[in-house]
Image (tube, rainbow, N blue to C red):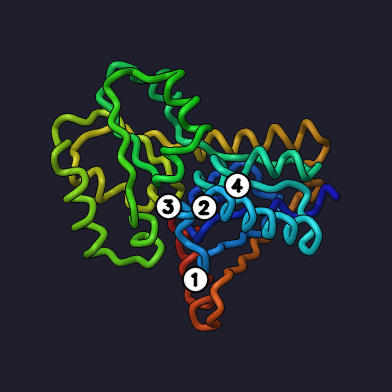
Amino acid sequence: MNNAPIGFLDSGIGGVTVLKPTINLLPCEDYFFFGDSANNPYGDKSDEEIIARCDEIVNMLVNDKKCKAVVLACNTASAKAAEFLRRKYTLPIVAIEPAYKMVHDLNPDGFTLVMATRGTIESEKFHRLYYKYNNNKTVLLPCAGLADLIEQNRQAELRDYLENLLGEYKGRAENVVLGCTHYPLARDIIKDILGEIKFFDGAPGVAKRIKAVLAENSLTGSSDESGVVEFEDSSPDENTRQKKKERFFELLEKY
């Protein structure tokens, strides 16, 4: 079981931003990444739809791929489905959430933008986090369609979208919480628009949590060799699946 893979679930390929720091911390583990791009974006779906789909995927990761732990590398999936999945499955399930507490810890007086999907911002889980650490200088920005633009690599439309969304905050924003695992892939454009800002991203903390959870459950891999990464996409079209796979491994190499 120690050499079984760690399963990653995301609505597309954005979760590569969580996988990469995890590999850096645990290079000898094997990984299986499932991108559910056929159902992307999750942020506009109902709670029931998200829970049902995540249940299907985790069932596959556990029973078909024999994963020893599962990582919800999607903020919306984490916000909506983590509690249900932890009640149903016995293996460790690690979830991500917007790094809003880091603002409280590191720059609590700074004017803050929380960029996330509508589903994440409206979730009970995020509300608990937000009201606990609210600095009263925070704007919540539901970014409908942003993950999709990043997923499809539509760079010109992506820049236009972000300029329209963020332009009024140029020179004002000090902190930006990247509350979707796709959004770090647009970090350079966001910084170009807003100027000098501090980014807050939950992925490094998730990687540390995965390492701790494996150790706590005696699941740390025993191999001394570099692990293997497998990728699967849910798109019905074979050509699309191949393109997703190519871009995933390109991002994994560069990120």
Horizontal relation, residue 113 to residue 64: left or right: left
Q: Which is more foreground, mark 2 or mark 4?
A: 4
> In the image shown, does 152 or 184 lie closer to the viewer?
152
Q: Mark 1 points at which residue?
A: 244
Q: Position of 2 compared to 39: left or right?
A: right
Which residue sits at x=74%, y=55%? 5
* Label 2 environment density (alpha carbons within 10 Å; few <14, some 14–19, many ≥20): many
Looking at the image, residue 135 lies above or below residue 196: above
Query: For this view, does 187 lie left or right of residue 194?
Result: right
**Badge 3, how many Cα within 10 Å: few under 14, some, many 20+?**
many
Q: Please report the residue visible at 24 percent of the width from the left and 43 percent of the height from the top.
A: 191
Is 140 or 35 nearer to us in this picture? 140
Q: Distance between the residues labelled 1 and 3?
A: 14 Å
N-terminal-most mark, 1 or 4: 4
In this figure, which residue is indicated by the disc labeled 2? 15
- Describe the element under mark 2 as helix, strand or loop: loop
* Residue where numbered disc 4 is placed: 72
In this rendering, does residue 155 appear at all?
Answer: yes
Q: Are dots 1 and 4 in contact, CB under 8 Å?
A: no
Question: 80 or 238, which is in the foreground?
Answer: 80
114 or 213, which is in the foreground? 114
If you read the primary sequence from the N terminus, does the residue marked by circle 1 or circle 3 appear first?
3
